[in-house]
Each structure stands twice: as C-alpha cells, then as structure tokens.
Image (cartoon, rainbow, N blue to C red):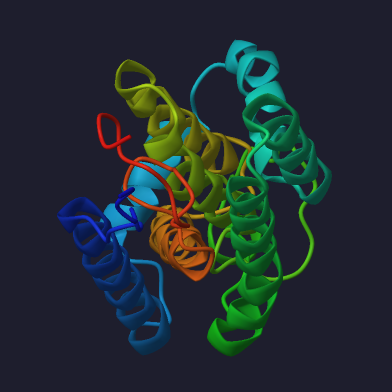
Amino acid sequence: MPRVVRGRVRGGEVAAVLGGAAVLAGSWWAVAVNREVPRWEARVFVAVNDRPDALWPVVWGPMQVGSFVGSLVVVGATGVISRNPRLTLAALVGSQAAFWIAKGVKELAARGRPADLLREVQLREEASGLGYVSGHTAVSFALAAVLAPAIPRPWRPAAWALATLIGFARVFAGAHLPLDVIGGAGFGVLCGTFARWAFGLGGQGLPARPGVEPGQM
C-alpha cells in the first residue's frame, strides 16, 4: 500500500520563527521605547550610507525584488519554473502580507526616515512616509523564507544573501536606518515561514498532500 507523505515542520523552520520574532521584538523595543537614534545605529548608517556612489547601479536592480512590482515578478517566475501552485501561492501571500502589513507597522512605530532624524544623509532615492519597518527588506526576506527550502541546497545561501543585499541597499540609498532593516528582516521571515505553513509546504518545499514515498510502490 502507498504510504501517505505529509509535510513536516522542520526544526530549522521553528528556529526561523523564533529568531524572526526575537529580531522583530528587539528592534521594535529599541524603536518604540527609545525615540532617538542610538549612537551605534547612527554610526552603522553612516558607514553604509557613505559608501561610493559607484555602488548604486550595482544594488539598484536587485533592490527592486523588494518592491511591489518586483515581488510579483518573482512570484510569477516561481509559478513558471516550479509549476507548484502551493509554493507559488505561499510566495504571493507571504510577500504581499509583508508588504501591506509593514505599512501598518510603520504607522504604529511612527519613526521617521533617516533624513528626518540625522544630518548629512546621502539620499539616493526619494522615500516618503515613515521608516520602521523597511517594506523592501520585509518582502525580500519573506520571499527568501518561502523559496529557499524549495531550491537546491547549494543555492539556498544565495536567496538569503540577496535579501541581505536588499536591506543593505535600503540603508545605502538613505531610505532606512539599520533598525528599520533589522525589523523588516525579522518580520519578513515570519511572514514567509507562516505562509509556507499555511499552504502545507514541507521542509523541502514539496506540497504536504497525499503522495507515495520512493520505493513504496
């Protein structure tokens, strides 16, 4: 008889949720309780924001993955390449949840952009509204959390590296402070992992639906 295979929640996924929650909570506490920019955060911002302008054309393209349109392009590519409806829907829901809920978090935190809080900010991209959390970073980490377990193991670090690059780009652009990006990363990991669970995806990115294990036919 074929044996039913169902998706399992892996220890790494649990660790991702706990880590994401801790990062989000820690950054939220720092932003909500201390309304001023900590010295360490200001120093990190300056160190990144002052990098040479020649980096801008390099990071601008990858940064678009964290935008509304860019995330939909990634979702569409996921559907075409994987032909896995659950994985595609998880990428869609996870990234869109990160994008739209981040806007509500911004209103709750009410933290300004770097130009509102610091002097001599090199602004490479116009950014209106509030800063915490970074929506681009949240979207990119949500996509990484959904898609990384579904790609070959050697390529998984690349998904997280791209999300990290996008967070770096947002600080380099002068659009966000480091805590905005840190909070966005934690929030994105939560959105992406919960989306995987909502669509019953197993640890390897396979649908958690009845199937046959190899060798059980």
Q: Residue at x 54, y 16 (%)?
A: 52
- Using the image as rendered, state which of residue 92 and residue 82 is in the foreground: 82
Quarter of the view holding residue 212: top left
Would you place residue 153 above or below residue 57 in this image? below
Q: Position of residue 173 (x, y in %)?
A: 63, 37
Describe residue 5's horizontal placement relative to residue 49 as left or right.
left
Closest to the observer, 64 or 181: 64
Query: Residue 96: x percent and y percent?
Result: 70, 62
Q: Nearer the viewer, residue 103 or 80?
A: 80
Residue at point 66%, 82% (across, down): 104
Q: Is residue 211 above or below residue 150?
A: below
Quarter the C terminus occupies: top left
> At 43% from the left edge and 66% from the top edge, which residue is drawn?
197
Give the side of residue 66 with respect to residue 163, left or right: right
Q: Is residue 34 left or right of residue 119?
A: left
Residue 74: image quadrant is top right
Q: Is residue 141 above or below residue 24?
A: above
The answer to whether 97 is drawn above or below residue 74 in the figure is below
Q: Quadrant of residue 100?
A: bottom right
Point out residue 29 in the picture as x, y percentages from the top left corner.
31, 82
Q: Is residue 168 left or right of residue 116?
A: left
